[in-house]
Structure formats: C-alpha cells, structure tokens
C-alpha cells in the first residue's frame, strides 16, 4: 500500500473511532446497575478481540515464514505482535479501570485476568527475541516459533471464563444478555476497532519494510565513518 | 528407527559427560534444598499451613531448577561449538534435539529425586504416587519446551535473561494443572487429581508435537 493510501486509511480509522465513541456515549443506554462506567465494556471487549486477531496474524505469519521463508509473512507477524501488544495493554488497563468501582479492586488473580497478563508477557518476549537474535533469518525463525507456542494462550484466555469459575463475567454478547441498543453499539465499536487494528498493522508493516530497507543500506555507513575518523586522526 | 538410535546416543553422550564432570546435578540438588530453606524463612510454616504452602514451594523450586538445567543443556555445546558439528552429520536435527531434551529431562528427574523426599521430610507432607506422577508428567512437557527455548537463546545475546522470559509464561499451564494435582494429593484442598493427570498428559502431547514440528527450525539455522 502506498503512503498516501495509508494516510487516508489512518484518517478513516480515527473518524470511525469517533463514530464508535458517539455510539458508546450517546446511543447506548446507561447500565441500570453499574452506571456510566459500564460504557468501558464496548472498547474493552473490542480491543480484546482485536488483540486475538493480531496474534492470529502473528501465528499465521510465523507458520507461513517457516514454511516458505516468505519475508512478507514475517513482517506481517512482526506488525501483528506490536499492534496486538498495544490492544492487549488497552484491554488490561480499561479492565482495571472498570474493575476498581465494580469489584472494589484493580486486580484480582482470576483466570481471565491472569491469562491475559500472561498473553502480554508472551508477546513482549516475542518482541524481545526479535531484538536480541541475529537480525534476518534467525530472528524471524525464532520469533515464528515463539509466536506459534504463544498462540496457545489465546484460546486459554478466551475460554478461561467457561473452564474456571472466574470473577470476570462470561460471554454476554453471544448469550443474548444485552439489550438491542447495547448490542448495536458493541458491534459498531467492534467493527471500528478491528478496522483500526488492520490499519495499524498496515502502517506498522510499512514501517517494517522501510526499516529493513534502511538496515540493508546502513551496513556500509559505520565502516565509512570509522575509516574517516581514522584518517582524521 | 534411526532417529531413535540417534536420540539415545545424544542423550547417552550428555549423561556421560555429566557423570564424568558431575557439574550440574550436585549444584542443582543443593539449589533445591536451598530453595526450601529460603521458603522456610519466607513463609511462617506450621503443621496447619504446610499442606497448602508446600505445593507452591515445590513448583517454585522445580521451575527455577528447570530453568538452570535447561539453560545448561546447550551451554557446553555452545562453548565448544560442537552443536554445529553434530548438525553436519546426516542425523536429523529433530532427533538430536530429542536426545538433548531427554538427557536434560533425566537430569531434572534426578534433581526431583532430591527435591521431593526433602520436601516431604522438612515440611512433613505426604509423598504419594499422585505427587510423583504429577511432577514427572509435568517434567516431560517442561523439558521439551525448556530445551527448545534453551536451544534458541543459546545463540542470541542476553541469553540468561531471555530464557526465563520466554519459558516461564509457557510453563504456566503445567504449574496450574500440576499444582492442582499436587495440592489435592497433599491434602491442601482442591479436587480432581485424576482429571488433572489427564490434562497433564494432554498438555505433554500438545507440547511434544509442537516442539517436534518446530525443533528443526531452531536447530538447523
């Protein structure tokens, strides 16, 4: 994608998030029990789903890289990991803000919360091995393996509320537990958030391409610099 | 068939070099006993809370001993650059990896043979078949995953830092399920020990399959 198109997409993503904000704050009714703080729900769940999607990109990109040694797949995986980590952070932080007034505490060692925190740590590790391994084939291969293993935690996070008895509520959307207006606001927010995630991955992908190109060019520069320093002395 | 022979030969080599140097196992055994001593100071142990706390101490000691054991699994190979030599032979990388993992797992089992009786003795908790089987089943999965990441970090910078960061989050399923089984067996509350054993076997299968699929990309690099 060209930079011009990426700019347009970014503007569209921001505009759509404002539309989502309109649905969250103006269209959706206030929760009878929890009050306005329940409006966190829309973005909290949407960003969790966006994070799942991003980590699925990491998984598929990793498999594709190991299979075909395709650099595009590897860059997509890299982009997915960064964006997924951002959305996991958003999910965790918004969840904590929501938990304080409703549960009386920011954090509880409940299966959903703990597995989400572990998810964050796994993909932070993914980015760390990328940084510390030898750039190129080794970093891509090692990261792909971590991405494949790391994805095991995604279904654990998702099903934790049904597998264990958790403080975190179970699925409300698919169980028809929400009134129609809340559902509409949720699906609008989710669509906008997923679009935002896709745009962020596209932008990050572009950055990865440019970084790779720069890395190829930069190799000679320190040698020239050091030889110049040598003659100057 | 050939792959199994290669794996056994690699495992035999590792165990023999450990037997000759006696480097890792004595240090690890001392380490787990020390972990129990530290735990004694960290928690106020008495006969009432021991069954509730001992399983946690067991997994803590085991996890950190495991990190050291698996971290060392590729250290000697790296220092002497002998892994490259092994990979140049026609033996399949997966078989070489299986041998290394087997040897590392057996060394950890030896360390467990020190840890479990000591724990039972010092904290007067029962040492049953259920406890031993849960620990051994968890060791299988922890060993394959730990060795895979150890093989990876052996070739990157800051390897001592990276191994725990990558390995610990993915060991959590074994600690959760194994912890549940041990907790039930030691009488610290919680049921479903047989269900936990089944789940440990499932996890072992999952991690062994995934590792056998990916090991070749990590080693043959």
Image (cartoon, rainbow, N blue to C red):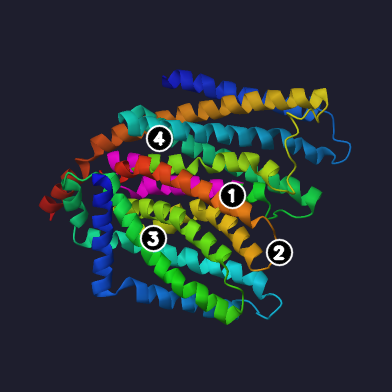
Identify the subunit bearing mark 1.
A
Q: Is residue A146 above or below residue B110?
A: above
Task: Assess disc 1: are there few (<14), some (14-19) or many (≥20) residues with their C-alpha within 10 Å of its C-alpha.
Answer: some
Task: Assess disc 3: are there few (<14), some (14-19) or many (≥20) residues with their C-alpha within 10 Å of its C-alpha.
Answer: many
Give me the C-alpha separation between circle 4 and circle 2.
41 Å
Q: Which residues are magenta?
A: A116-141
The quarter of the picture where residue B81 lies is bottom left
Secondary structure of the magenta portion, mostly? helix
- Residue at mark 3: B105
Give me the C-alpha separation between circle 3 and circle 1.
28 Å
The quarter of the picture where residue B182 lies is bottom right
Left or right: where does residue B166 sit relative to residue B8? right
SS at circle 1: helix
Q: Position of residue A133 (x, y in %)?
A: 32, 48
Q: Is residue B189 above or below residue B39?
A: above
Residue A117, numbered label? 1
Residue A62, numbered label? 4
Left or right: where does residue A156 sit relative to residue B117? right
Q: Do the residues at pointers 4 and 2 share their chain?
A: no
Q: Position of residue B90 (x, y in %)?
A: 17, 44
Contact? badges 4 and 2 (CB < 8 Å): no
């Amino acid at each position: 994608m060209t930079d011009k198109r990426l700019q347009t997409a970014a503007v569209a993503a921001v505009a759509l998030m404002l539309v989502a904000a309109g649905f969250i704050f103006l269209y959706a009714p206030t929760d009878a029990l929890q009050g306005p703080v329940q409006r966190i729900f829309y973005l909290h769940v949407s960003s969790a789903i966006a994070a799942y999607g991003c980590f699925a990109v990491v998984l598929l990109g990793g498999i594709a890289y190991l299979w075909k040694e395709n650099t595009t797949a590897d860059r997509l995986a890299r982009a997915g990991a960064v964006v997924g980590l951002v959305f996991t952070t958003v999910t965790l932080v918004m969840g904590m803000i929501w938990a304080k007034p409703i549960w009386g505490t920011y954090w509880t060692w409940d299966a959903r919360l703990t597995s989400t925190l572990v998810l964050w740590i796994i993909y932070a590790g993914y980015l760390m091995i990328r940084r510390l391994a030898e750039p190129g084939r080794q970093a891509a291969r090692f990261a792909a393996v971590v991405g494949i293993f790391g994805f095991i935690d995604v279904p654990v996070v998702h099903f934790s509320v049904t597998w264990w008895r958790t403080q975190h509520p179970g699925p409300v959307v698919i169980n028809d537990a929400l009134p129609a207006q809340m559902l509409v606001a949720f699906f609008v927010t989710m669509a906008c958030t997923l679009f935002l995630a896709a745009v962020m991955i596209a932008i990050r992908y572009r950055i990865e391409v440019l970084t790779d190109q720069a890395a190829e060019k930069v190799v000679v520069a320190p040698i020239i610099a050091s030889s110049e320093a040598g003659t100057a002395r | 068939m050939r792959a199994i022979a290669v794996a056994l030969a690699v495992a035999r080599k590792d165990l023999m070099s450990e037997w000759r140097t006696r480097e890792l196992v004595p240090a690890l055994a001392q380490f787990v006993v020390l972990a129990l001593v530290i735990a004694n100071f960290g928690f106020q142990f008495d006969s009432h809370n021991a069954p509730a706390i001992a399983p946690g101490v067991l997994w803590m000691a085991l996890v950190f001993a495991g990190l050291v054991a698996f971290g060392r699994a590729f250290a000697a190979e790296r220092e002497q650059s002998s892994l490259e030599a092994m990979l140049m032979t026609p033996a399949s990388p997966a078989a070489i990896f299986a041998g290394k993992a087997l040897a590392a797992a057996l060394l950890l089992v030896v360390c467990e043979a020190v840890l479990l009786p000591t724990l039972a003795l010092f904290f007067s908790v029962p040492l049953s078949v259920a406890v031993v089987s849960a620990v051994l089943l968890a060791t299988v999965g922890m060993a394959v995953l730990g060795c895979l990441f150890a093989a990876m970090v052996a070739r990157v910078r800051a390897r001592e830092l990276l191994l725990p960061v990558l390995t610990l989050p993915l060991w959590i399923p074994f600690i959760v399920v194994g912890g549940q089984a041990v907790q039930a067996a030691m009488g610290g509350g919680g049921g479903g020990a047989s269900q936990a054993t089944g789940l440990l076997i499932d996890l072992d299968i999952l991690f062994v399959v995934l590792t056998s699929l990916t090991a070749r990309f990590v080693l043959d690099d």
